[in-house]
Image (spheres, rainbow, N blue to C red):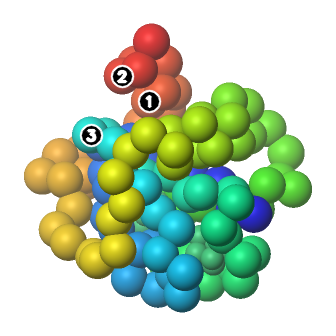
Amino acid sequence: TFVVIDNCIKCKYTDCVAVCPVDCFYEGVNMLVIDPDVCIDCGVCEPECPAQAIKADTAKNLGIFPKLNADMAKIWPNLAFKRKALPEAAEFDGKPNKYEAFFS
Ligand code: SF4
Ligand code: F3S
């Protein structure tokens, strides 16, 4: 499966949603997650993210994100269509440790 990581937070560009063939993205206030039970590992979303916020789950140092994706995908609503990025996306793109800053 693929995993949405830290840099999606406060950006939420949603280009990933536009290309996913199985609509397995779920939406929180600040970020999206991927449902690992539905993702077919096609990989097309990874290069579409302007924030480089999608990684294969075989990547190193994903921290809490594999679990966070799996858990939140069961709670948050599905998002199947691209829409405008968050207004603060450009400002927050690339800021380090966004998870600690906004979720803990
Ligand atoms: Fe969707 Fe493919 Fe990305 Fe999985 S890897 S979330 S199936 S676009
Ligand atoms: Fe987030 Fe990138 Fe998708 S910023 S919403 S993972 S295109």
- Three-letter amino acid code of the residue under disc 3: Val
Distance of label 2 from label 1 (alpha carbons):
6 Å
Q: In this image, 100 relative to 102: left or right? A: right
Characterize the local packing of mark 1: few (<14), some (14-19) or many (20 or more) Cα atoms within 10 angstroms.
some
- One can see residue 93 in this view: no
The percent position of residue 61, horizontal first and vertical second, equals 79, 38
Q: Residue furthest top?
A: 104
The yes-or-no answer for disc 1 within 8 Å of ligand 2 is no
Of badges 2 and 3, nearer the viewer stands 3
State the quadrant of the N terminus.
Answer: bottom right
Badge 2 vs badge 1, beta-carbon distance below 8 Å: yes
Q: Nearer the viewer, residue 5 or 32?
A: 32
- One can see residue 67 in this view: yes
Compare marks 1 and 3 and give the one earlier in the sequence.
3
Reading the image, the residue beneath label 2 is 102
Reading the image, the residue beneath label 3 is 29
State the quadrant of the C terminus.
Answer: top left
Distance of label 1 from label 3 (alpha carbons):
14 Å
Mark identifier at residue 98: 1
Ligand 2's image quarter is bottom left
Q: How many marks?
A: 3
Residue drawn 47% across and 86% down? 19
Disc 2 is placed on an element classified as helix
Against 84, residue 63 (above or below) is: above
Residue drawn 60% across and 57% down? 35
Residue 85: name its quadrant: bottom left
